Amino acid sequence: MKKVTLILSLVCAILAIILAILPLFKLAFIPAILALVFGIISFIKSKKDNQSTHVVQVSFLLVIIALGLSTYKTVFTVQEVGNTEELEQREKENEEKALEELEDLDIDLE
């Protein structure tokens, strides 16, 4: 059970790091929290059996890096909206073209 939770913790921590780097950084919180939970379980089992906890500490370090990077990107990333007037004008032109095409169609209902 300890090895399974340790492996799950490492996999989730690495996945959280990868997601934190990509533009999907907001999704990195889910595997980071899972890695934290699995790491805590593995840490408790390692302490109970008097075994080394170095790998668990590496997992915690990766989780902290992923959470820090994701939080930084969430706080300091500004979503800029482009010029919506141009988009609205294009949308109106497209509607007018579509209406003209529909008016030009001859539908025979026989």
Image (cartoon, rainbow, N blue to C red):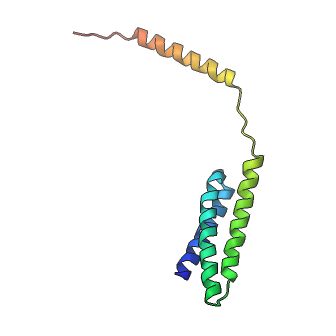
Image position, residue 23 (x, y; %): 66, 50
Along the line of sight, the residue nearer the viewer: 81 or 58 = 58
In this view, 35 is above or below 48 = above
Q: Height in image: 69 above or below 98?
A: below
Position of 60 with respect to 99 (left or right) is right
Q: Residue at x 64, y 63 (%)?
A: 32
Residue furthest bottom in the image: 50
Q: Give the percent coordinates (x, y) of residue 89.
A: 63, 18
Is residue 27 or residue 41 the one in the foreground? 41
Q: Quadrant of the C terminus?
A: top left
Q: Is residue 108 left or right of residue 21?
A: left
Residue drawn 63% across the image and 74% down it? 40
Residue in the picture at 56% in, 81% down = 2
Q: Quadrant of residue 16?
A: bottom right
Question: Compared with residue 66, is residue 10 higher up or lower down, i.e. above or below?
Answer: below
Q: Is residue 56 left or right of residue 7?
A: right
**Badge count:** 0
Q: Position of residue 103 (x, y in %)?
A: 42, 9
Which residue is nearer to you in this view: 2 or 17? 2
